[in-house]
């Protein structure tokens, strides 16, 4: 990713912050575990993965300092260099973007089925470690895996710039926002229908403006139940199983 531009990501993040629908909602609680963080603001919860990050010595009280602050101020942490702080910031941003759970229609069509449907006989890219990758390979034309860690079958990194513009479908995890690669992928896969998925995915229309076609995310319906799951250090599969979350899909309309 030698051509990656931090400037691209800065523009994306600043526009997402400017477009927050509930910027003044006050943070009521910040819940942290080994795997996820949840920020509750104005009665709605936003989630973000920690991607294995742990707080530095000077960050151990950072989560609790957000309580009582507006979502917009808390979400500004996405501009920090520490992954721990960035994750807290995106959880706050997701709380500020979170729709009213009572007005959300659950989506019972899994994101992997959407990718398979759109990707039939097409060239598909997948960014992120998803358990459905092997099965998906049998359902699409050609599947390219873009992975920073050494993963069997992943596309060599020196081929990324060449392959991304040829993709017809690109599915990527919302955690690419945390690692500051989202804008890079969106700006290179110019031909592709783009699906962003996973619990870190914000319900932000700004992502549509930058090229996304589908946002497949989650909405917390029971903050108490999900908070308990986060504190118990559950993986997302088990958080889902524990309840308090519905899945939804937002589609680009123009």
Image (tube, rainbow, N blue to C red):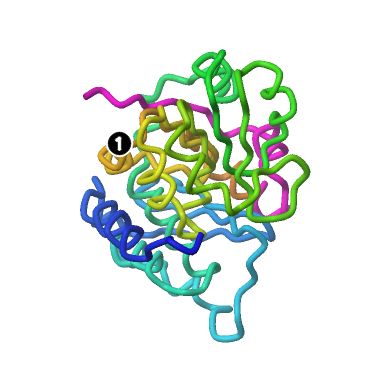
x and y percent of residue 102 in the render? Answer: 39, 26
- Answer whether residue 249 is magenta in the image: yes
Q: Quadrant of the C terminus?
A: top left
Q: Which residues are magenta?
A: 229-254
Q: Up-down: is 82 above or below 241?
A: below
x and y percent of residue 114 in the render? Answer: 52, 19
On screen, residue 224 versus residue 235, left or right, reads: left
Q: Up-down: is 134 above or below 89?
A: above
Report the front residue among 39 and 1: 1
x and y percent of residue 80 in the render? Answer: 42, 73
Residue 76 figure quarter: bottom left
| Residue at point 45%, 26% (across, down) | 168
On screen, residue 237 versus residue 169, left or right, reads: right
Residue that lies at the very extreme toward the right in this rendered image: 152
Which residue carries the number 1 mark? 208
| Residue at point 46%, 31% (across, down) | 195
Residue 204 figure quarter: top left
Asked which secondary structure carries label 1, the reply is helix
Report the front residue among 47 and 69: 47
| Residue at point 40%, 64% (across, down) | 78
Report the front residue among 64 and 176: 176
On screen, residue 207 versus residue 234, left or right, reads: left
Task: Characterize the local packing of mark 1: few (<14), some (14-19) or many (20 or more) Cα atoms within 10 angstroms.
Answer: some
x and y percent of residue 20 in the render? Answer: 26, 49
| Residue at point 54%, 68% (across, down) | 83
């Amino acid at each position: 990713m030698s051509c990656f531009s931090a400037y691209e990501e800065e523009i994306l993040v600043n526009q997402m912050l400017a477009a927050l629908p509930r910027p003044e909602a006050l943070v009521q609680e910040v819940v942290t575990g080994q795997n996820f963080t949840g920020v509750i603001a104005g009665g709605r919860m936003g989630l973000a993965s920690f991607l294995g990050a742990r707080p530095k010595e000077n960050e151990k009280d950072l989560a609790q300092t957000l309580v009582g602050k507006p979502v917009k101020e808390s979400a500004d942490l996405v501009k920090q260099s520490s992954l721990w702080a960035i994750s807290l910031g995106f959880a706050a941003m997701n709380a500020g973007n979170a729709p009213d759970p009572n007005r959300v229609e659950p989506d019972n069509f899994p994101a992997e089925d959407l990718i398979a449907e759109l990707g039939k006989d097409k060239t598909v890219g997948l960014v992120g470690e998803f358990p459905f990758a092997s099965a998906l390979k049998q359902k699409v034309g050609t599947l390219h895996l873009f992975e920073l860690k050494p993963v069997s079958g992943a596309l060599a990194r020196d081929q990324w710039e060449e392959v991304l513009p040829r993709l017809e479908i690109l599915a990527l995890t919302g955690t690419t926002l945390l690692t500051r690669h989202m804008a890079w992928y969106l700006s290179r896969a110019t031909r592709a229908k783009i699906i962003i998925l996973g619990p870190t995915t914000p319900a932000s229309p700004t992502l549509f403006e930058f090229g996304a076609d589908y946002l497949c995310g989650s909405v917390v319906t029971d903050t108490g139940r999900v908070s308990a799951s986060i504190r118990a250090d559950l993986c997302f599969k088990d958080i889902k199983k524990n309840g308090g979350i519905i899945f939804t899909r937002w589609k680009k309309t123009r």
